[in-house]
Image (cartoon, coloured by chain):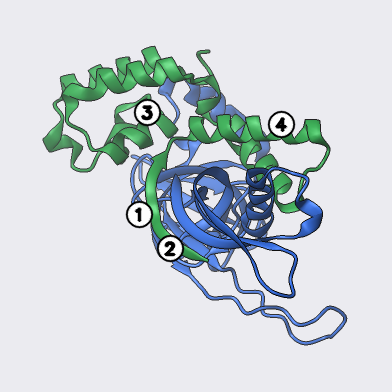
Amino acid sequence: MFVLAEMKDVLRVTPDNFHQSLSESITTLLNRKLANKVVLNVGLCIALFDITHIGYSYIFPGDGSSHTEVRFRYIVFRPVAEEILIGKIRSCSRDGVHVTLGFFDDILIPVNALQHPSRFDETDQAWVWEYPKEDGEKHDLFMDSGESIRFRVTSETFEESLPSGPPGTECAVQTVAPYRLIGGINEPGLGLLTWWEAPEQDDEDDNEQDNDE
Amino acid sequence: METIKPNAAFLCNFEVMQILQQLKDSTQKKHKREGSLATVTYETVHYLQNSDCKHQNAQSIEKFLEAMKPFKLTKSEKLMMLNTPPHTELEIQLIVQESEERLSEDEVRKIISIVNEHLPSSDTA
């Protein structure tokens, strides 16, 4: 789920940072620029891995800062398609189940990728998998918020986000998620971790669920 | 800014956790943690510490990969096994594409025992 991305950038180090070593300033600048941000078609940047090359530094007329070309590798969150991830349910809505990994929230399991047959319970605001029992009856398996869920990443979308307006103005700021993952749980073994636990633990789980209901 | 290779190498969850923890320790000493970096490292470490990679170490991962060599799995399949260690046949079916054709029942059982040996889950540890 994590990869290294190789990138290149020209960094401007202002004179008040000249007391530090150049690599230290570069590390700070890169982490300030990229940490916790999404780069288009790359993924969610986490932290600097290493600096592979530092070029010559230049000083331009009228500016005391030094400009340095740097090549570096960054730790990026970008799961590959078909990867299995474990997250927690953030909320359920008519669109499907929203999942969070803690550091990444924009994961949706759409209705058509839930276990079949599923229904949306309006009173509990949760999706329910109507697991068919052998005797023809159904066993309701609720997907409550906060539960751990195993899902398969099916696709990803990047969206270019526009810069927000100057502070203080009340222009409509678009809040589109720059990087979204679409997941699926419509395979045996996927879904809440408690659904698929080893049989000897099943009895306890059933009792717990009965108590909850 | 320019991206040279968006996908230069894969990292397993354990490696990421180690790097981030070192980063957390070193920046705490200097008292200058940058906002967004601190947020993302905290949240990522929090997620990783609740996963199975908390109990892994470099030697066990190396031994695991060595033991997995005869099964002819792809790199990403082995990576997924490290990140979410499979303890049941069902979980192997999810990770390995067309596992029924590529792995015999014996092999699946062997993989589970290798996983249990080198990558213990949070319950057994």
- Asked whether the residues under the numbered discs 2 and 1 touch, taking CB atoms below 8 Å apart as contact, a structural biologist would say yes
- Horizontally, residue A140 falls left or right of residue A125, namely left
Q: Are marks 3 and 4 in contact (CB under 8 Å)?
A: no
* Three-letter residue code for mark 2: Glu
- Of the numbered discs 3 and 4, the one sitting upstream in the chain is 4
Disc on res. B26: 4
Query: Which chain does the numbered disc 3 sit on?
Result: B
Q: Is residue A202 left or right of residue A177?
A: left
Colour chain B appears in:
green
| Residue for point 35% across, 54% down | A81
| Cα–Cα gap, marks 3 and 2 | 25 Å
Q: Quadrant of the N terminus of chain A?
A: top left
Q: Which residue is mark 1?
A: A81
Using the image, name the chain to which the residue with label 1 belongs. Answer: A
Q: Earlier in the sequence, mark 2 or mark 1?
A: 1
Q: The chain shown in blue is which?
A: A
On residue B86, the disc is: 3
Q: Residue B112's spot in the image, x, y percent?
A: 31, 20
Q: Secondary structure at mark 1?
A: loop
Q: Residue at x 42, y 46 (%)?
A: A131
